[in-house]
């Protein structure tokens, strides 16, 4: 039907336009039957921060409780699978079936064979297309503009309480609500023990700390395992993006300007520091002390005496 893979071209277009704007809307009849297949990566909300770390590569943000998508058409085809793959690769989501009364998007036309003839005036076709596009764009903008409105809340990263400067901290990426609850229980037990150091409070502190640490270590292992799987998949599927992942960890301010090198060596060459002769310094450290028992001529008798003590072979 197409001379090229239209969905592959759409993925490239979405990636290109996403660098210019974060607001993308893809419209059109793609002849794609998707049933109720997932247009997002399943279970990606377990550790959404992993996808946030890879966002500069994938341009993908994890979903938080995506609404259920309803679809009266339970059939699938090849274009449907490609459309779902496009959504998973680009972060786009299918709107049909997710709005209020999602089952209302019933079939427009359903049959085994469709034949349609469009009569078009060549002279007025371009003007008509331009008018239709302008009208459609205006109506669509009026409808979706409230949903794309961005708001920002100003907040300070630090606050002063009770005369002390307190900085807000960020939890580890593997933390969830249960882990935060166990940490709160553990910190409460710690404060109680510091106020009243009795055996009962000490046992409660040990118990709550053990529960908190065991649960946190379990989440941490799952997080590291999932992150490692993503890196392994990226290493095999696209090595260039895999190594690009580590480029952000490089320090960009380590390069020394050429002018600084010039000034440094210029200063060294113009300094009045005397040149030290290493050979002369070594010779000066050698001691001139002599030993009389060694500083004498070895006689022939002494040589023969030493030779006679040597062991002869059989």
Image: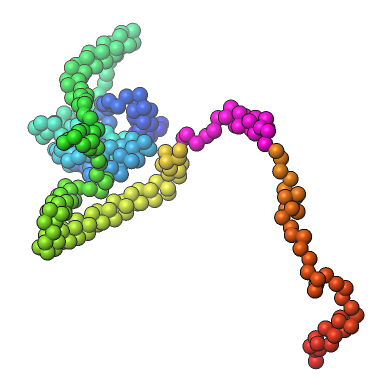
The reply, left or right, for residue 199 in relation to residue 265 is left
Q: Position of residue 191 (x, y in %)?
A: 14, 51
Which residue is rendered at x = 22% and y = 48% of the image? 175
Magenta part of the protein: which range? Answer: 252-273
Q: Quadrant of the N terminus?
A: top left
Which residue is rendered at x = 74% and y = 45% of the image? 277
1 and 295: which is toward the camera: 295
The reply, left or right, for residue 314 in relation to residue 187 is right
237 is within the stretch colored magenta = no
Q: Position of residue 170 (x, y in %)?
A: 25, 41
Count of numbered badges drawn on the protein: 0
The quadrant holding residue 39 is top left
110 and 220: which is toward the camera: 220
Q: Is residue 79 visible?
A: no
Q: Tell me how the rendering is colored.
A: rainbow
The quadrant holding residue 310 is bottom right
Q: Position of residue 305 (x, y in %)?
A: 85, 85
Give above or below for 125 relative to 201: above
Q: Quadrant of the C terminus?
A: bottom right
Which residue is rendered at x = 45% and y = 40% of the image? 250
Q: Is residue 20 visible?
A: yes
Q: Residue furthest bottom?
A: 314
Which residue is rendered at x = 26% and y = 11% of the image? 131
124 and 97: which is toward the camera: 97
The quadrant holding residue 113 is top left
């Amino acid at each position: 039907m197409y001379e090229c893979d239209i969905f592959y071209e759409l993925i490239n277009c979405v990636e290109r336009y996403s660098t210019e704007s974060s607001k993308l809307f893809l419209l059109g009849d793609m002849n794609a039957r998707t049933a109720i297949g997932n247009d997002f990566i399943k279970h990606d909300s377990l550790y959404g921060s992993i996808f946030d770390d890879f966002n500069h590569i994938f341009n993908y943000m994890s979903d938080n409780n995506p609404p259920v998508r309803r679809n009266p058409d339970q059939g699938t085809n090849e274009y449907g699978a490609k459309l779902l793959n496009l959504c998973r690769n680009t972060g786009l989501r299918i709107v049909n079936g997710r709005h209020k009364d999602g089952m209302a998007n019933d079939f427009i036309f359903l049959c085994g064979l469709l034949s349609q003839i469009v009569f078009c005036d060549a002279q007025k076709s371009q003007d008509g297309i331009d008018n239709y596009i302008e009208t459609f764009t205006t109506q669509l903008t009026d409808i979706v503009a409230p949903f794309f409105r961005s708001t920002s809340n100003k907040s300070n990263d630090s606050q002063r309480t009770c005369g002390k400067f307190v900085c807000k901290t960020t939890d580890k990426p593997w933390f969830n609500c249960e882990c935060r609850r166990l940490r709160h229980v553990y910190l409460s037990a710690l404060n109680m023990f510091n106020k009243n150091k009795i055996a009962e409070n000490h046992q409660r502190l040990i118990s709550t700390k053990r529960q908190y640490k065991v649960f946190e270590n379990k989440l941490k292992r799952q997080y590291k395992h999932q992150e490692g799987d993503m890196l392994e998949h990226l290493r095999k599927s696209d090595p260039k993006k895999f190594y690009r992942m580590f480029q952000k960890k490089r320090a960009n301010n380590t390069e020394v300007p050429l002018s600084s090198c010039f000034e440094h060596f210029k200063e060294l060459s113009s300094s009045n520091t005397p040149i030290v002769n290493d050979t002369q310094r070594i010779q000066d450290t050698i001691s001139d002390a002599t030993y009389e028992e060694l500083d004498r001529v070895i006689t022939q008798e002494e040589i023969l005496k030493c030779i006679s003590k040597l062991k002869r072979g059989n």
